Image (cartoon, rainbow, N blue to C red):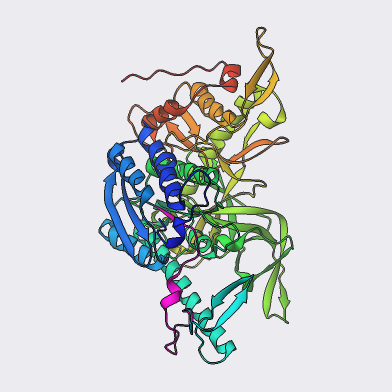
């Protein structure tokens, strides 16, 4: 938490200072929901607090979440913030505090809250030994935006001074990002969440906080201004992420392919049809599609003139897989002599290719074929659900059709025997959301719509469209004779196509307790956790679903 002098400002409505607002919201909106969540084991999580000014001060370390912790956090509301807000000492203190957790099963959530840009550069000397960001001769002033300020020290000419100042800031930024990456390396990028929160003047730049969040795949940046409502919403969102982190499955026993770096800045692919190798693409033509026949993988070939092009680096990752931009290409290549590059032409739509994050799952097609079977089974449940539910198009549920491809001629250093197996599916259009996970987490309903009553005694029934995925998970358990539950529902929704989901998890109620649907199968305990948080609403009522009972 930023504890620099600017946090003393009394510009937050209803609070005497920014510090008071921050600690009040941290207690009420971030920690208290964790304490009140009866699903969570309070002994499995500890909290440390670091306050950031010129140096970093550890206020407390490894405290369990209880009423005493809430009181301690609230007691920080009236402390006096002072001096500068230096990011580097705070990040270094985080690493020092967590060093003993290296190579353990620990998961980490780092909330980094500041009301301004870092001040680390102020006392740094340039390569010529001058502190070019410090104030110089107090008798020399300049006027900017109606205010007088003391001129900063110079290092030679104006151009040379600017170059020195830029070099110092660049160096400080690089070091901050290196420390954030190091946290990801210590705990695993799929086990580390960083949430950076900018709670200050909305006109100020918070570039560093945004860069820090973008450095890890599960990072988030929120710029709030100085309205406490925005701070409450941001911390409420982060507590949801924390609950997910605490309840989701672990793949720690597998070896992560750490050399693969996620490039979240790729964004959407340009609409052009030219695939240029020098722009970060790999193209393969020895490709065959695998069909699932029971537990066997049966090959079938593409048309001979088509191949597959992938981005070299993934744009995203989940707990088990990397996601790459992908398309099919024609075999005939074009030489762009001006650029000295080979160009292939895209054929058909854009796809997303998914590949295992772990070395152990790259030795055969078994992992990807399991994902394919799960998605096909979920699609069968969705078809039955749609027929039974009826209603308008926005109520329909579909799972993306996916295919597993075997690709030969790959880099043998990375792929056993030079063969890779990837799962391809169409790229989703729209805002990507997650409605539930595989361990009881449920997205909170946000709005209610009304429709004509389905009962004689009611003129109207209200419903929230976000309740529908939860009803589908409930339906899948009932329709499978209480043997399977489809969850981890994520994708997009619109009023014309309804829900389009990808990457479902299937929880199985096996007498043996064996995970028959892969690593994300939480079994009967996961099914019980779903029903502990699920509340039947309009759609469950329409389908005639009732809550199951479980023996203790």
Q: Is 147 rendered above or below residue 127?
A: above
In this picture, residue 151 sits left or right of residue 342? left
Quarter of the figure that contains the N terminus? bottom left
Answer whether residue 85 is visible to the viewer in this image. yes
Q: How many marks?
A: 0
Q: In the image, is residue 496 part of the stretch drawn in magenta?
A: no
Residue 243: percent from the left, percent from the top? 41, 41
Is residue 125 one of those drawn in magenta? yes
Residue 368 placement (x, y as % from top left): 49, 48
Q: Position of residue 426 (x, y in %)?
A: 64, 48
Q: Nearer the viewer, residue 91 or 25?
A: 25
Q: Residue at x 38, y 42 (%)?
A: 246
Residue 251 in sight from this viewpoint: no
Question: In screen coordinates, is 528 left or right of 225?
Answer: left
In the displayed structure image, the side of residue 266 where residue 187 appears, left or right: left
Question: Range of the magenta residues?
Answer: 110-135
């Amino acid at each position: 938490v930023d504890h620099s002098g600017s946090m003393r400002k009394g510009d937050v409505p209803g609070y005497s200072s920014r510090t008071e607002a921050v600690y009040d919201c941290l207690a009420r909106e971030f920690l208290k929901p964790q304490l009140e969540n009866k699903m969570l084991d309070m002994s499995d999580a500890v909290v440390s607090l670091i306050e950031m000014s010129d140096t970093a001060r550890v206020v407390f370390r490894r405290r369990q979440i209880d009423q005493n912790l809430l009181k301690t956090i609230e007691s920080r509301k009236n402390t006096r913030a002072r001096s500068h807000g230096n990011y580097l000492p705070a990040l270094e203190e985080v690493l020092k505090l967590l060093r003993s957790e290296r190579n353990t099963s620990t998961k980490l959530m780092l909330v980094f809250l500041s009301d301004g840009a870092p001040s680390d550069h102020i006392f740094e000397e340039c390569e010529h030994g001058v502190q070019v960001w410090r104030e110089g001769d107090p008798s020399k002033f300049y006027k900017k935006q109606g205010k007088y300020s003391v001129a900063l020290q110079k290092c030679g000419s104006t151009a040379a001074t600017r170059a020195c100042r830029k070099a110092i800031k660049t160096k400080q930024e690089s070091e901050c990002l290196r420390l954030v990456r190091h946290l990801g390396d210590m705990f695993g990028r799929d086990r580390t969440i960083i949430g950076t929160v900018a709670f200050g003047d909305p006109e100020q730049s918070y570039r560093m906080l945004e860069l820090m969040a973008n450095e890890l795949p599960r990072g988030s940046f929120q710029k709030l201004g100085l309205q406490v409502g925005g701070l409450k919403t941001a911390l409420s969102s982060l507590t949801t992420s924390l609950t997910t982190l605490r309840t989701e499955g672990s793949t720690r026993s597998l070896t992560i392919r750490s050399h693969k770096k996620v490039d979240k800045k790729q964004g959407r692919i340009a609409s052009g049809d030219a695939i240029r190798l020098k722009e970060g693409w790999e193209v393969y033509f020895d490709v065959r599609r695998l069909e699932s026949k029971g537990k066997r993988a049966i090959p079938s070939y593409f048309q001979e003139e088509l191949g597959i092009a992938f981005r070299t680096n993934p744009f995203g990752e989940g707990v088990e897989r990397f996601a790459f931009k992908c398309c099919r290409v024609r075999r005939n290549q074009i030489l762009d002599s001006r650029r000295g590059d080979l160009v292939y032409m895209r054929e058909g739509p854009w796809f997303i290719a998914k590949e295992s994050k772990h070395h152990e799952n790259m030795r055969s097609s078994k992992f990807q074929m399991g994902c394919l079977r799960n998605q096909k089974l979920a699609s069968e449940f969705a078809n039955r659900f749609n027929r039974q539910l009826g209603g308008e198009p926005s109520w329909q549920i579909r799972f993306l059709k996916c295919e597993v491809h075997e690709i030969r001629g790959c880099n043998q250093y990375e792929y056993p025997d030079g063969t890779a197996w990837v799962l391809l599916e169409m790229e989703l259009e729209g805002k990507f959301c997650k409605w539930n996970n595989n361990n009881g987490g449920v997205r909170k309903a946000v709005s209610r719509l009304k429709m004509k009553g389905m009962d004689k005694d009611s003129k109207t029934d209200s419903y929230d469209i976000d309740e529908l995925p939860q009803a589908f998970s409930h339906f899948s358990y009932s329709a499978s004779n209480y043997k399977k539950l489809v969850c981890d529902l994520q994708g997009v929704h619109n009023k014309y196509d309804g829900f389009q989901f990808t990457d479902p998890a299937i929880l199985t109620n096996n007498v043996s307790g064996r995970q028959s649907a892969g690593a994300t199968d939480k079994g009967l305990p996961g099914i019980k956790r779903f029903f502990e948080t699920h509340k039947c609403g309009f759609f469950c009522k329409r389908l005639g679903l009732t809550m199951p009972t479980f023996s203790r």
